[in-house]
Image (cartoon, grey):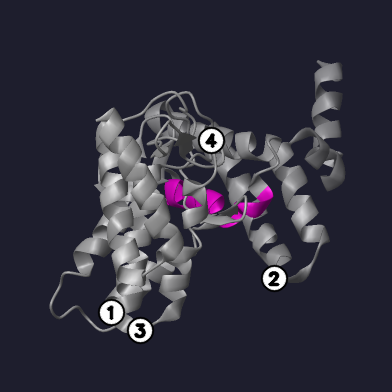
Amino acid sequence: MRRACLAMLACLLAPPAAQAAKDPVLTTLSQIESRGGAAAADAQGWRDDYTRGKVAARKLGGAPQANIRGVLSNLRSLAERKLLGSRGYPAFLILERNLEWFYDDRRSAPAYGTRTTFEGSELIWQFYPGSGWQLQPLANFGRLNGLLKLKKPAAGRLEKFADDMLTTGVQRRGSLAFEYYFPWSGGAPGWISGMATATGMQAFANLGARDGDARYTDAARSMIGVFKTPPPWGVSVQGPAGPSFLLYSQSPNVLVGNGIAQALIALDNYRATTGDADATALVDAALAEARRLL
């Protein structure tokens, strides 16, 4: 008993640096804080969220506990692979939303695939048992495309939605990407979808053309790199006639016909909207390979 008490006391008295050395998430946050600037302030807030998350994981029970633990595990997975530092905003936003739902509001776990929004934003969140509420890039880009069809949207509504989505984007080997932060199809958190990426390019390009705002067009252009990059960082798989595009970047041997078709339709719309010569060459080559496959 005395030995156990001493061990507990040592943990409580351990300096932050010692605690961080044992936890990859805390190590990452300490590294961000040491660099100073605005990112350091963000990291301090994320540290508070992480502490609350661990408290929630102890105090909750049943499905709420399992989902909070899953979100924390996903954070640790990103940190262990040295990815969390550049993905702090979306990764900790996911933790915040799950804490809000399960811990602050004490709400139960919904059915698999349930979608919701949280106050202050129209971003779509989808429920995945064991990983809680997750950002859903394909659903969100689909919504933006739907909003673009409105004849008289409320002033600023489309731009607010697009800006909220842009804040969740990250740099992935030089390309703007919108990742999924839960395990799926054998892949660890931080994978991408070719279909979702192409739909995002289509949506941002059309909003840029509608508003005459280069920010959105530039965002769309900066996403094309994932279609030129092989997995796991990109979704391009070279075939005899040209590239095919993966539905899931973590599944290089799985070509999904619907995923390829939808990606090509969205990319074709993007190139028609922007006149992007790179996209034209890419789509033409991918169409040749799609005809061979499909």
Magenta range is 85-100
Q: Which residue is mark 1?
A: 210
Secondary structure beneath label 3? loop
Give the alpha-carbon distance from disc 1 to disc 4, as whole Å.
33 Å
Residue 95, above or below 131: below
Q: Which residue is mark 4?
A: 231
Image quarter hosting the N terminus: top right
Three-letter amino acid code of the residue under disc 3: Gly
- Lower sequence index among marks 1 and 2: 2
- Lower sequence index among marks 4 and 3: 3
Q: Which residue is mark 3?
A: 212
**Label pair 1/4, CB-CB below 8 angstroms:** no
Give the alpha-carbon distance from disc 4 to disc 2, as whole Å.
33 Å
Secondary structure beneath label 2? helix
Q: Nearer the viewer, residue 142 or 237?
A: 237
Q: Nearer the viewer, residue 65 or 5?
A: 65
Mark 4 or mark 2, which is nearer to you?
4
Three-letter amino acid code of the residue under disc 4: Pro
Q: Which residue is mark 2?
A: 38
> Label 1: how many residues lie within 10 Å, few (<14), some (14-19) or many (20+)?
few
Give the alpha-carbon distance from disc 1 to disc 2, as whole Å.
33 Å
48 with respect to 249 (left or right): right
Mark 3 or mark 2, which is nearer to you?
3
**Label pair 3/1, CB-CB below 8 angstroms:** yes
Give the alpha-carbon distance from disc 3 to disc 1, as whole Å.
6 Å
Residue that lies at the very extreme toward the left in this rendered image: 151
* Residue 290: % across, % down: 30, 37
- Lower sequence index among marks 1 and 4: 1
Residue at 37 percent of width and 30 percent of height: 129
Q: Nearer the viewer, residue 226 or 94?
A: 226
293 with respect to 219 (left or right): left
